[in-house]
Amino acid sequence: MKNLWKNFNLFGWGLIGATLVLKPTQAQAQYIQRSFLNPSFEQPVFGTSCYIQVDESFIIGWTTSHSPRQGTSSCPVGIYGQAGKIIEIWTTGFNGGSGATSTATNAGNQFAELNAEEASELYQNLCLLKDETITFSFLHRGRSSSSVADVANFLIGLITDPAPTVFGTFSTTSNGTVTAQPVAQNGATIPTVTNNNAGNGWVRYSGTVPYTGTTGNKPVGFAAVSTAGGNNTIGNFLDEVQFAGKPVVEFTASSGGAAESETNPTTNPPKLRIVGLVPTGGISVPISVSGTAVLGTDYNTTSGTSTFNITIPAGNYDGSDATSVFTIPFTVINNNVPQGVRNIIFTIQTSTSFFASSTTTCGGSPTVVSNYTIYDDDFLSGKVWDDADNSANNTFTNINTGSETGTNAGGLLNAILVDANNNVLKTIPVAADGTYTFLDVPFNQSNVKIILSTTAGTVGNTAPAQSLPSNWVNTSPLTTATFNTGTNISSKDFGIEQLPDTNNVTASLQTNPGGTNKSQVPTLSAIDPEDGNFSVGKSFKIISLPTNGILYYNNVAVTANQVINNYDPTQLTLDPNDGAITVTFTVAGVDAANKEDPTPATVTMPFTGSQPKVLLVKRITRINNQDLNDIVDGRSDVSTSAANYVSPLYETDDDSDKPWPLGYLRGLINAGIVKLGDELEYTIYFLSNGLSNATNVRICDLVPGNVTFIPNTFNGMTPNDGGLPGADQGIALAIGSTTPTAYLTNVADSDRGHFYTANDSATPSYCGINTNGAVVVNITVPSFPSLPAATGSGTPANSYGFVRFRAKVK
């Protein structure tokens, strides 16, 4: 972009038009910076007669050493009211009445105060070249005193550096009095100045600086030294600041070219890019030409000779847009004579008005030669497009749409010109960008055609068959209609595109839902060279249906070869046949060109059958009148006498990290030594922890041989479970609760519990040998036919519970 600055009259640079400084974009970062951008602080515009302190990111070009803080303002804040490393900007007329502060004569409407809230530095990072001489100019003004000056340094480097290069110290009062002539340092030359030479209390200082440091990007700017009143929060006004060496020039590209029919080259002609400050009157860049093309026969320059000049007008160029680029003017001579390929070599000649150097890397090697190739216009040309959306639709029209690009299908494609007898006239590989050009095609050939093939033709031989590389398909015909040769035949274009590849997917092993219940199909996905990875919202074709289940989309049965458009993965479900089975079906992704994967992917969904499981954990939860509320996880890798020992295979059931409710398994596994007459409470916890609901659940617990069952432990407690009134209640049952939900009688009646005395022949066989009594509880009954499988900690509530009884030590 071309950035002009205002009223910079220095050593012949003269007056350069109005300021035009746009906020630098990301693109600008690729170019070096050779001069100050936004030198007059005019961007952005903040208002009239006000001041504002804003984060440095809003002041285009400028950076500050100021510490971060929340700025203040009398201007309309808008988007600028945020904390940061502040830069303070004043607009002309601020400070009221006769004390209002204005810019210098013809110096715009805004200026900066160097001392915002502390002594700081305002600077920009410039590319400086070793041993160059740099010219500078700026306006300076004190703020608070007409007799005592505000003082600032102009320097290369940061004030925090060990040894910044100060090349000038400047002292100015609020009425423009220069209390001390500028102090030049480090080889700088600074002419003496007169008071108030720029008007309104401002003084313009200027000079030159020899830069002897290493080539590179360096911070250049102003640092506050002192203020008139000693208050570092006020003082040192700056405006129209510029520091620049000679501009840098190079070609934008080392090569280009076009057909000779492009007599005023526009496709990719040689261009100069300039970065830096061009003084009043502009500069001339001398160019010389050479090469195989003949001056006056193949092309002409503006001078008619092999040397000419490009004029660069005055301005401040940052390289970022078209205003920093200048096309080399020349013309190409078109004729009907086949001449083949010719080139013009443009070379930048040396000059004292600019540096030939890289515009992208500070001090880097420049592109000083640009080779322009003239292609004979007596040719046939075309392009092979990656027609990602199939806009051609098997025609030669509307092949390229949107952002589609050219392709040569991985370098495997050839364009072949064939005569009326199907013999090869010309053959050429298609270029990486999809273009192909037949040079010096014979005139007035009738009924020729062009074919695309992976096999290169041999001139004079029969043409190979049309073909494409693997996984490519055509969206236009691969052979053109016949035509007659002539001058400048172009746009013989073709459309091809690549096929998608669908991903195989396997669902995690899951329980068969049974019946007509459905399971979610895992998300389908595919990858396409043009469309990238695609899934939700795209198209998929169900190639084959499962043989042991029914596939549904949006609750409607899917049919073979059905295409699902705008795919929603939540709508694709499967009702598998019951049992432990694996269901598979195949699917193909369909890309934006409506082309499907020729090798469909397989979706695999394994299911297990119903596998109920009930965990049982037995604990001592009370001794005499003392409840035991310990939470103990069982282990098998400890001593058998340990308090948490459980034999192998069962210790994991005794862990509270199963889906038991938190803190549910209270009590002790080994309660220690008890004595004759002690009363013990046994609690048998149960949890449905299988892949399906548990049915016909009965628990039998044999009373230990060294204790006697207490038959009346829970007498008088409610609720009961339909047992005989007055019968002893020695058994407690809880389902989905930490406390008993029913108290059961010991006798065989209508409730769920029964105590079988020792050696009772009616003891159920699943109890084993009953030598000391057995407590039996039917957990599931007709009114409660199953324990639902646990799905999480304590959920569902009726998936767990306990059976409890007490016994006395013999």
Image (tube, grey):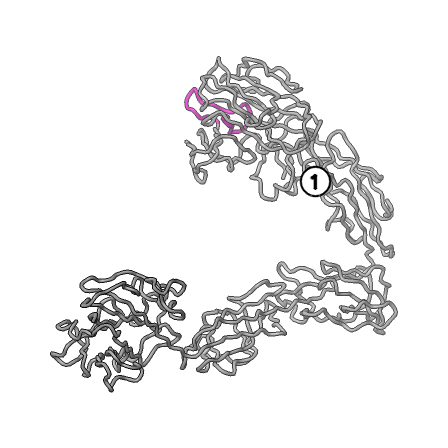
Q: Quadrant of the N terminus?
A: top right
Give the residue at the far left of this rendering. 726
Reading the image, the residue beneath label 1 is 273
Q: Within the image, what quadrant is residue 636 found in?
A: bottom left
Q: Please state which of residues 672 and 47 is positioned toward the viewer in this rendering.
A: 672
The C terminus is located in which quarter? bottom left
Instruction: Give me the residue at 86% from left, 67% from top.
Output: 459
Q: Quadrant of residue 130?
A: top right
Foreground pick, 649 / 9: 649
Relative to the observer, which residue lies in front, 728 or 520? Answer: 728
Which one is nearer the viewer's eye here, 585 or 583? 583
By secondary structure, the bulk of the magenta-drawn segment is best described as loop
Horizontally, is 725 left or right of 556 in the view?
A: left
One can see residue 766 in this view: yes
What amino acid is found at the position of numbered circle 1 in the picture? Arg
Image coords of residue 374 (percent x, y) = 81, 51
112 in the magenta segment: yes
Q: Which element carries disc 1, helix, strand or loop?
A: strand
In the rendered image of this protein, does residue 555 appear above or below residue 138?
below
Give coordinates of residue 155: x percent, y percent: 59, 24
Instruction: Report the label total.
Output: 1
Which span of residues is magenta-colored? Answer: 92-113
